[in-house]
Structures are given as C-alpha cells and as structure tokens.
Amino acid sequence: AIALAAAGRGLRARILRRRLLAAVRIQAAGRAAAARDRVYHLRRRLCATRLQAAVRSHRHRSAFTARRGAALRLQSKARMASQRRAYLRDLAEKKEEAKLSTQLAKLQARLQAEMEARQNAERALEAGAAADEGSGSGAAVA
C-alpha cells in the first residue's frame, strides 16, 4: 500500500510538473510574441523617425542650396553692375583722352604751320626790305 501510494504521489508529481512546464512554455511563447511585437513596432517607429529626419534634412538642404544660389546670383549681378559702371567710366575717359589727344595734335600741327608761315613771311619781308635797300641805295649812288 505504501509503495502504491508513493507511486501515485510520484505520478501526480510528474503530471503536475509536466503541466507546470507546459504553462511555463505557453507563458514564454506569449512573452516572446509580445517582445517580438514590441521590437517590430520600435523598429518601425525608429525607421519612421529616420525617414522623417531624412526628409526634413533633404528639405532644409534644398532650401539652403536654393537660398545660397539666389545670394550668389545677387552678388554676381551686383559685382557685374559695379564693374560695368567702372568699365563705362574708364571707356568714357579713354574716349575723352583720345579726343583731347587728337585735338592737341591738330592744334600742334596748326601752330607749326602758322609758325612756318610766319617765318616764311618774315623771310619774305626781310628779303623784300633787303631788295628795297639794295635797289634804293644803288640808285642813290648812281
């Protein structure tokens, strides 16, 4: 009877142990499924966050590039306008200088011609006066 009772208690203990292990396995499977769900949702949230960050970064980079390009174009136009004004001013000065140079050359040529004409006229007068003296003194002597 004692051996039978001991065998009965051992059987009951093994059945309880199997039930306990089965319950532990079921609980572990449930916890594992819940953990997998949590990890899945965390990864999705992390991916969504990374995606949102990438989109925001792209938008900001594009806006910055556009603004920088606009600023560069404005600076370029301003430099171009400044250089154009300086070029036109220099061009006007060169034209004025060339005009004055041409006028100076004409005036110098005219002055030279007038000086030569005056010298020729003076020589002619001197030659005429010398001829008058020579003819006047020769007639008076004779």
Image (tube, rainbow, N blue to C red):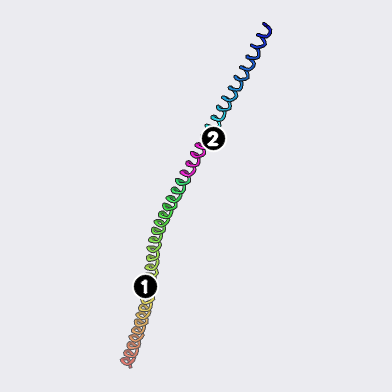
Q: In the image, which disc is placed on residue 39?
A: none
Q: Quadrant of the C terminus?
A: bottom left
Q: Say which residue appears at 44% left-offset and 51% top-offset.
A: 66
Q: Residue furthest top?
A: 2
| In the rendered image, the vertical position of residue 82 relative to residue 41, given as above or below | below
Give the image location of residue 95, x and y in percent.
39, 68
Amino acid type at circle 1 is Gln
Residue 53 vs residue 89: left or right?
right
Give the image location of residue 68, x and y in percent.
44, 50
Q: Mark 2 or mark 1: which comes first in sequence? A: 2
Q: Secondary structure at mark 2?
A: helix
Q: Residues within 10 Å of mark 2 (few under 14, many from 20)?
A: few
Give the image location of residue 19, x and y in percent.
60, 20
Helix, strand or loop for the magenta stretch, by majority: helix
108 or 85, nearer to the observer: 85
Between circles 2 and 1, the one closer to the viewer is 2
In magenta stretch: residue 129: no
Start-end of magenta stretch: 44-57
Return the residue at label 1.
103
Give the image location of residue 133, x and y in percent.
33, 87
Q: In the image, which disc is placed on residue 40?
A: 2
